[in-house]
Image (cartoon, rainbow, N blue to C red):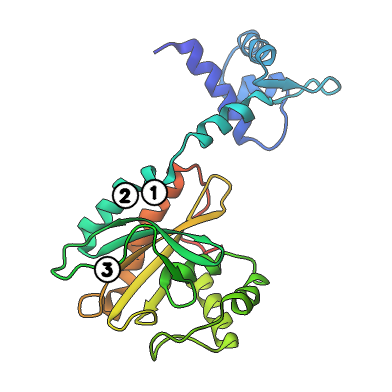
Amino acid sequence: MNFSVAKAFAILEYLAAVDGPKELGVISAALDMNKSTVYRFLFTMGTLGYIKQDPQSGRYALGPRLVWLGSRFLDSLDFRGVARPYLEQLVAETRETVHLAILHDFDVVYVDKVDGMQPVKMASQIGNRMPAHSTGLGKALLASLEQDQWPVYVQKKGLTKFTPHTIDNPEVFYAHLQEVRERGYAIDDCENEDGIRCVAVPVRNHRGKTIAAISISGWSLTMTPERDESLARLARETSRQISEHLGSLVDMRAEVR
């Protein structure tokens, strides 16, 4: 290990973790480093743009070059590629089919799918568009939007009734989305197709914004209501791992938002 590099990154991580700019002496004491050593690192990183010093207070903070560095990493992420191994692990744990989807123009669009181990396969395909109000994926994604977008969805897309279980009353639907927020996961209880149930949770990016959702789906014979809580825990853990890989620090055990 190059200890000079390690010390430089220790300074950067310290300044990233603390609240506001810090004096040289405070940084030195916090990291148990000699003042002159810390100063040399700060000066060099400041010259490169990774540290900035307030000309009046003399305090140090992270510099603008780090924004560029972080953005280059984030731009290089393919969240579908990042998610794939976690989706495969979720299938191995549940034996059910797992989907990854986004919300586009208020429709659910499948961007990946890993078939489950049940004898009858799901007919869904990557690229398919599905209604949001009657699917677990859609409800997890809609619940992550601002509440004023819920009536916009109803006005634009309607609440078409696909099965006897589909929610087609706007006020009931809004209350249901609020429940999804509070519970942290959505359920499609045979609302889009007879005999098909699923549990879905959101996936967040580095800004804590919901960018996708994952679902565990299958026939109601195996996707019983008694499994909802345990499947939701597994889905939330998978979502947490994907979201952390994308840079999210948001607690995925909290509400959908």
Q: CA distance from mark 3 to mark 1?
A: 27 Å
Q: Are marks 2 and 1 in contact (CB under 8 Å)?
A: yes
Pointers 3 and 2 in contact (CB under 8 A)?
Answer: no
For label 2, the residue is: 86
- For the C terminus, give its image quadrant: bottom right
Most extreme residue toward the bottom is 164
Q: Nearer the viewer, mark 3 or mark 1?
A: 3
Instruction: Tell me if residue 184 comes above or below residue 14 in the rendering.
Output: below
According to the picture, the residue beneath numbered tag 1 turns out to be: 241
Residue occupying the far left of the picture: 119
For residue 123, which numbered disc appears in the image?
3
Give the residue type at disc 3. Ala
Q: What percent of the width, then of the height, locates residue 140?
A: 48, 67
Mark closest to the chain's N terminus, 3 or 1: 3
Discs 2/1, front: 2
Give the alpha-carbon distance from disc 2 to disc 1, as whole Å. Answer: 8 Å
Q: Residue at x 57, y 26 (%)?
A: 69
